[in-house]
Image: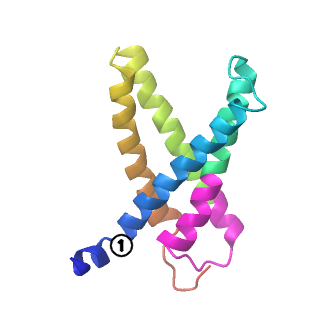
Amino acid sequence: MKDLIKKYKEIISYLIVGGLTTVVSLGVYYGLVFTILNPDNPVQLQVANVSSWIAAVTFAYFTNRIFVFQSKKKNILKEMISFFVARVGTLLMDMGIMFVFVTVLGFNDKIIKLFVQVVVTVANYIFSKFFVFKKTHRGE
């Protein structure tokens, strides 16, 4: 069992951090709409939604950097920008899949959203591992 955990430590850590990131996202969103923002107002709804996304991606960057991929790169700003760009890419992927399958093809949004979450989670891991936190010999 220890060998199995050691072999999949990065993926297990990634999934734990992902769960915590979801808590941050929901916490910020609900915190805002239950206190200072009115979700019945379309602009305030989007402010809450975007704020929760920014908080979640910021939290995800630092926790992935430290606990999952253990990055030692010196240029943190470049790495952080790459992380945010990758997350915007998967956000657009999420929106595109939802549009095609729900709006165009008429599938059930709840089922498609579950499917999309799996696709986005896998894509986020791939982008993080092979592009954002890619191991280099110079530690740039």
Question: Which portion, as a residue range, is magenta?
Answer: 57-81
State the image quarter where residue 5 is shown.
Answer: bottom left
- Is 5 placed left or right of 24 in the picture? left
Q: Quadrant of the N terminus?
A: bottom left
Depicted 132 relative to depicted 85: above or below = below
- Is 73 placed left or right of 135 in the picture? right
Secondary element under disc 1, as helix, strand or loop, is helix
- Measuring from the top left, give residue 73's x and y in whole percent: 61, 77
- Measuring from the top left, give residue 12's x and y in whole percent: 36, 65
> From this viewpoint, which residue is outermost toward the left?
1
Residue at coordinates 67% horizontally, 65% vertically from top-left?
78
> From this viewpoint, which residue is outermost toward the bottom?
138
Tally of numbered tags: 1
Based on the picture, tell me whether residue 120 belongs to the magenta stretch. Answer: no
Q: Nearer the viewer, residue 58 or 97?
A: 58
- Is 4 placed left or right of 115 in the picture? left
- Measuring from the top left, give residue 136's x and y in whole percent: 51, 80
Q: Quadrant of the C terminus?
A: bottom right
Residue at coordinates 66% horizontally, 43% vertically from top-left?
28
Q: Nearer the viewer, residue 35 or 28?
A: 35
Residue at coordinates 43% horizontally, 27% vertically from top-left?
98
> From this viewpoint, which residue is outermost toward the right?
36
**Magenta stretch mostly in which secondary structure?**
helix
Q: Nearer the viewer, residue 108 or 35?
A: 35
Residue at coordinates 68% horizontally, 22% vertically from top-left?
39
Other residues around mark 1 within 10 Å, as few (<14) / some (14–19) / many (≥20)? some
Q: Nearer the viewer, residue 131 or 122?
A: 122
Depicted 35 relative to depicted 140: above or below = above
Q: Which residue is mark 1?
A: 9
- Measuring from the top left, give residue 107's x and y in whole percent: 32, 18
**Label 1 sits on what residue type?**
Lys
